[in-house]
Amino acid sequence: MLYSTSPVAIAIFAFFVAAVLSLSFYLGRRAKSAQGYYAAHGQIPWFINGMAFAGDYLSAASFLGICGLIAFYGFDGFLYSIGYLAGWVVALFVIAEPFKKLGKFTFADALDARFNSPGIKLAAAVSTLIVSVFYLIPQMVGAGVLIRPLLGLPHWAGVLMVGLTVTLIVVTAGMVSTTWVQFIKGSLLVLFCGVLVVLILQRGFKQTPAVNAPTDASEPAGFISTNEYALTQLGATKIALPAAWKNYLRYSLPSGRTVTFRVQQPTGNVPASPILTEAQVLSKTTHGTLVNGLPQSADNDLRPVGTIAHLPNDAKTTGPLGPLAFLRTINDSTIVTWSSETLRDDQGAHQVFYQVPQSGAALLTPGGYFKDLKKEKLPGRLDFFSLMLALFCGTASLPHILIRYYTVKDASAARKSTIVGIIAIGIFYVMTLYLGLGAMTSGAMDPTNNNMAAPLLAKSFSNVLFAIISAIAFTTVLGTVSGLLMAAAGAVAHDLIESFFKVRSDDHAKVLHGKIAAVVLGAGAMVLGILFQQLNVSFLVGWAFNIAASANFPALIMLLFWPRTTAKGIAAAVFVGMISSLGWILLSQQCYKDVYGIDPQLSPIPFSQPALVTIPLGFLTLIVVSLLTQPRQPTATSPLAALV
């Protein structure tokens, strides 16, 4: 069964969580001051901080989301890996050393280093909170996804579990504990994903025959599927469907139950259909057809899917493969992928899943997920390039990543830790291609939830490996969420309460304010994680990158490299970039479809990803406002002139 639990899996998971909490309680004794709570006293070794960068950055989006996108759509999912990794080039060569020299606790410290401006503090704090919230949502969704197969609990229970655990970590020990949790989980994630890739290569591929071939292609008046043929023998009644459902059929069975399935034209001569019982009709799939909209077996559990229909040279198996041979075999094979379609009628929305045989060569070229890359549609291409721009610029603009530079002692350590992070992150992202393709052909996918591709791939080898991978993925969520809560806590306690509202506090109060902010934000993230559970986590993280890149990147770059930048220019750029990108996302076709559940054609936005418009808008705003607010030059008769 796809989602069965085991005592071993529960024990391993409990061990990981207990170890993380024990570490937090132990390290909590070392983080009593504000400097210790928010920046770990600036004494984290550069190698530890580099691996913590990896642990912080390799979130649920990287592990669950990217692997799921590759498993369902092929190479397009890997484009996310490329975009995420490319952003570290900016962080290394542009941001690392200058940023370390500018601040003390938070992202706002860096932006306001030269100005002491309440406007910058407010803008940067609000931006940090909004980016953190949008980044928290996919982490919580990922937590709920993991808990269901591991512990047999519903999605909401997983969200609450990770929310309460990570809030306890942040409240207990702050940045010291967060850093070590991120170091441990980053190291384990890279290590065990490497083990999983080795097992994938050792297993190789095997050809799996199609299940329940369709009816005889010589039948007149079009193609009648196996299930429809069986239904006519049962005395089922055909139900009329809207014209938009031209590829679908629906029948009412004598028992009162209904079945909906997709019809596809077969190729070649195949055996005639058998006469099936009603129970068989309700449990079996056919060529390109799924009964009742879900892949179900006789025991009503989800049927695992993901097969190769044809291997090169008509081989039945390949045996172990090297990394390049693995990709060549995929390229020359025919793979049965899965797709879905949501159709609406007067009875509501119906989601139907069905098989789509594709050539491996097509899956290894762009256009599976970003479909408009293969079409002459400008909005779709702009949407893709806008996303890549957001990933490239957003990495160096994420507040929870940037504050890691304050945990090392100097600029040289900041640069070294960035290099370590890039190496670990780069190795992991290369492995995501093999993990995704391995899941695609593993026979262990859940077509209703692409976020589960990597954990179920591990389960296809053993329950122990599944438990370890799932527990590491869970700690991945813990590490990333704790970093986000730390960034948000600093924004509230340091930037808003102390700097903007001028509430003077001692170290104890500063830490207390941050802990209260972490609790409130953690509770809000739990609610949002439950509401957004159906969306792919990489897709959700793309929104956070768009907002971070639009609001923070122009201000940070111009502060570092344009001497005429002013405080009002920075504040205006942050607010304009943040509001415009957030508004664009909320009005986008993707949001209309996946969040509001209404016709995406009603959206006034031509493409969903805003960075291509909102990042230049942020730069333009900063330049114009800065030029209009330049400090006045002293005149010859002024007292200041005499001092020059």
Image (cartoon, rainbow, N blue to C red):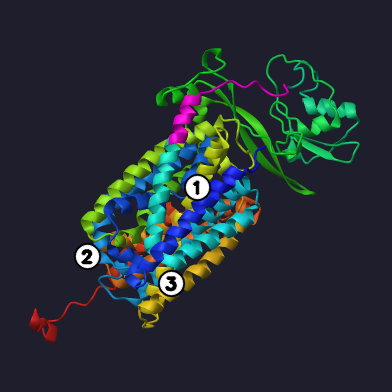
**Residues at marks 3 and 2 touching, judged by CB atoms closer than 8 Å:** no
- The residue where tag 3 is placed is 514
Q: Position of residue 499 (x, y in %)?
A: 35, 77
Q: Nearer the viewer, mark 2 or mark 1?
A: 1
Q: Is residue 257 left or right of residue 402?
A: right
Q: Amino acid at mark 2?
A: Pro
N-term mark: 3 or 1: 1
Magenta segment boundaries in residue numbering: 195-213
Q: Amino acid at mark 1?
A: Ala
Query: Is residue 200 shown in magenta?
Result: yes
- The residue where tag 1 is placed is 473
Q: Which mark is residue 563?
A: 2
Q: Position of residue 71 (x, y in %)?
A: 54, 36
Q: Amino acid at mark 3?
A: Gly
| Residue 389 visible from this viewpoint | no
Residue placed at 24% from the left, 55% from the top? 413
Q: Which mark is residue 200?
A: none
Residue placed at 30% from the left, 72% from the top? 567
Res 487 quadrant in image: bottom left
Distance (Cα) linking label 3 and label 2: 33 Å
Q: Secondary structure at mark 3?
A: helix
